[in-house]
Image (cartoon, rainbow, N blue to C red):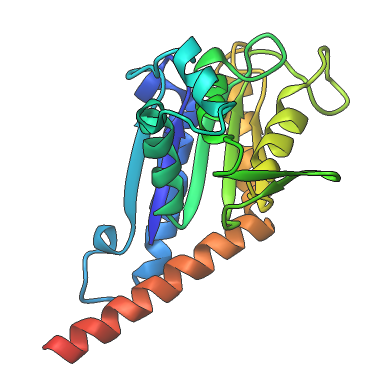
Amino acid sequence: MKILLINASPHGEASHGYRFAGEIIGVLREYTAPNAPDAPAASAIKVIERDLAATPLPPVARDYARAVTSRTPDKTQFDVSEQLIDEIETTDALIINTPMHNFTVPAALKLWIDYTLRIHRTFASTPEGKVGLMRDRPTLVIVGSGGVHSGERARQPDFLTPYLRYALGSIGIHSVQFLLLQGLVMGEAAVAEALDAARAQLTGDAVFASLAAQAARGASMAAVMAARTA
């Protein structure tokens, strides 16, 4: 099983969301252990990481924009786009860690979206709107915010979750669950409360259950292959 971890937080490994993503991956690896007791759990799940903050993507420039809208495009302009799309295509699941910047996604994640949403490649334009051309896969989106934008204590609007859900759906990814880490600048108690709420949400979450099932199946297959080659 391969997981693509997209990190859009400028705080990198110090991000609460990034550490929570690591915690989730650790839990998934525990699901593999009962099925492959003789194999290292880490070997059953491979994580491909794309850190959009540490290694920023180049801005969308005129030549790329021209290629996207051309009937005879210069395909060399799609090198970055193809690399990002290939990372999605070759993995079984997505985990996206992103902060909320000014009510929506940060610029780093917006660039990733701009390169991965490409007509005739990841979506088709129809009279009914965009139709995704990519295979659906379980996707967890961890959203970190200093303020509160969801629930009874919300004090600001949230344009991130509907926008990102629609953007991912436009390329065919519909199995998306958002895990909200809110109030992260309100002290250690608020951080602990946000993490506990996100952990509790995972317990009954269908997307996470699908991820866990995939991890368990992958480990079972690994055990079978190991036995056959022994």
The quadrant in which the N terminus is found is bottom left
What residue is shown at x 28% (from left), y 63% (from top)? Answer: 41
Q: Where is residue 151 in the image (x, y as percent from the top left)?
A: 84, 28
Give the farthest residue toward the front. Answer: 72
Left or right, 159 with respect to 113, comes to: right
What residue is shown at x 28% (from left), y 86% (from top)? Answer: 224
Q: Quadrant of residue 19?
A: top left
Q: In which quarter of the image is residue 74?
A: top left
Left or right, 130 with respect to 211, comes to: right
Left or right, 54 with respect to 24, comes to: left
What residue is shown at x 33% (from left), y 44% (from top)? Answer: 48
What residue is shown at x 72% (from left), y 14% (from top)? Answer: 103
Q: Position of residue 67 (x, y in %)?
A: 50, 25
Q: Position of residue 159 (x, y in %)?
A: 77, 21
The quadrant in which the C terminus is found is bottom left
Q: Nearer the viewer, residue 127 or 57?
A: 127
